Image: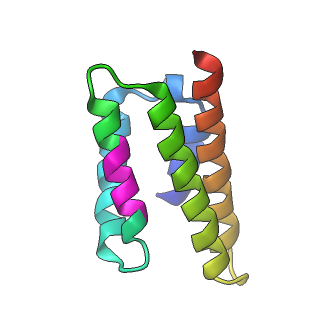
Amino acid sequence: MLEDTVATLSNGVITVSANNGVQLLDKWTGILNEGENTRDMGNLLGQLRQALNEPDAHSENIKHLLEQLAEQVSVFSADTGSEGEMPSQLESLATALRNTANQLSTAE
């Protein structure tokens, strides 16, 4: 699911349907809320979902939430250690989140 999420974000926010985006957020929120050390990221995803569902969603707020999430993913990546492929996959996710946030800046 991590690789699919990175691929989805890398394709650009314009290519993600609202329904697919919400489903992806819901899946991740459920997974992240299960772990004590990932609950903050789950809460941020909940805030992001709420912001996206607002009729007058502000891209600046969404951008800020994506940047916060990217930072938390980077910290979590560092905490997982350097062995295996998980740290690099998490860093790829953090980069994809930052790039998505930047796309929102340039789309306005």
Q: Residue furthest top?
A: 108
**For the magenta stretch, what is the residue range?**
41-48
Q: Is residue 70 left or right of residue 53?
A: right
Q: Is residue 77 above or below residue 107?
A: below
Residue visible at 27% across and 31% down in the picture: 53
Residue drawn at 66 percent across, 38 percent down: 99
- Residue 100, placed above or below residue 15: below
Residue 78 placement (x, y as % from top left): 67, 75
Nearest the eye: 54 or 28: 54
Let me know if residue 44 is in the magenta part.
Answer: yes
Secondary structure that dominates the magenta span: helix
Kindly indicate the quadrant of the structure image that contains residue 23.
Answer: top left
Q: Quadrant of the C terminus?
A: top right
| Position of residue 54 measured from the top left corner of the image (x, y, whole percent) | 27, 28
Query: Percent x, y for residue 36?
Result: 36, 80
Question: At 67% across and 84% down in the image, what residue appears?
Answer: 81
* Rendered image quadrant of residue 104: top right
Identify which residue is drawn at 46% across, 58% down: 1
x and y percentages locating residue 41 in the rendered image: 43, 62
